[in-house]
Image: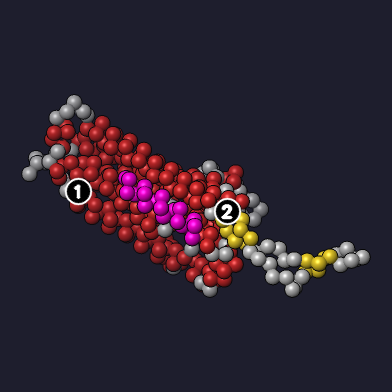
Amino acid sequence: WLGCAVALALFCSIRVWIVAQFSMERFQTIVEQFREFEKLSPVPFEQLFTYAGRIAVTFDEPIVVLCIAVWAIARGSDCVSGELGRGTMEMLLAQPFRRSQIIGSQAAVTVVGAALLMLVTWLSIYFGVQLTTVKEEPPPATWKVPLFGFEVPNLLADPEPVEVPMSERVDSRVFAPATFNLFCLTVFLAGLSTLLSSMGRHRSTTIGTMVGIYIVAAAMKILAVASESWSWLRYGTFFMLYEPQAITQMVVKDPSQAWVIVTQASETEPAALGPLGYSLPLLGLGVLAYLLAGLIFQRRDLPAPL
């Protein structure tokens, strides 16, 4: 856990610093060259032309998702099959504990650990925003025309970029719903790993199965986004419920929609899934996986240690 926390803290804070190093005009010029690939982006490119939109990409970075997935799978796979593989399950069950308590305690520790990792992630972004400045071009200098009272641009002036605290351009609270979405993904992966662990004997088999599921789910999302003919695959992968960038866009546009399941319809946009509409199904599936794992573990016959 500590290693993942340190990695998340360092990466998220450095990621915010990197965002501040590129002026918005230069970044927009670069991104415009890839306009034909906009369909692969979870949000319109216009959102990436804001500081909040660029920081929100942090939640989709492979390092962040990989840290969370590794920790969740490691925790879940060790719950039952890990103990069986080490030959310590019999000693554990010899204590005055019910099997459901073993699963429950593992789940509680995992959920608390996931929540603390999310706190580390959000605080890293928060302090990165508070301690970083961005360079912006000031408004063009003008001359006031005597007698007439109006101003004309001063084309001879060479304005120097001014440093502005990023905290004046970004409200860190807009990333809270995206952080919760990442938390729900963590609980889901840990719950699914625990479910597979409760049915298996070897931890390596559980980890291998989870890695396979993860890769297939990621590939299905890529295909669903890249091609209209494969768009039906979006209904078969849990990654379609992990949309931190889209969630951040909703919150930036309307902060009142930060914690809703379905957004309100307007004259220009129909009702759609809100931030909780993405996060709660992931959380519910994770809880369901834990419940099924407890039920299976209570009823299964455990093999004798080798």
Location of residue 29 in the rendering, given as x and y in whole percent from the top left corner: 57, 71
| Quadrant of residue 58 within the rendered picture | bottom left
Q: Which residues are magenta?
A: 1-18
Query: In the image, is 142 to the left or to the right of 233?
Result: right
Give me the residue at 26% from left, 36% from top.
103
Query: In the image, is 23 to the left or to the right of 2?
Result: right
> For residue 43: magenta?
no
Residue 20 higher or lower than 92, as above or below: below
Q: Secondary structure at mark 1?
A: helix
> Could you tell me what secondary structure mostly forms the magenta stretch?
helix
Location of residue 183 in the rendering, given as x and y in whole percent from the top left corner: 41, 45
Numbered mark located on residue 203 in the image: 1
> For residue 15: magenta?
yes
Q: Amino acid at mark 1?
A: Arg
Query: In the image, is 219 to the left or to the right of 303?
Result: right
Label 2 crowd (10 A; few <14 / some 14-19 / many >=20): many
Give me the residue at 38% from left, 59% from top.
62
Q: CA distance from mark 2 to mark 1?
A: 46 Å
Q: Amino acid at mark 2?
A: Met
Judging by the rendered image, the residue that carries numbered circle 2 is: 166
Label 2 or label 1, whichever lies nearer to me, is: 2
Quadrant in the picture for the N terminus: top left
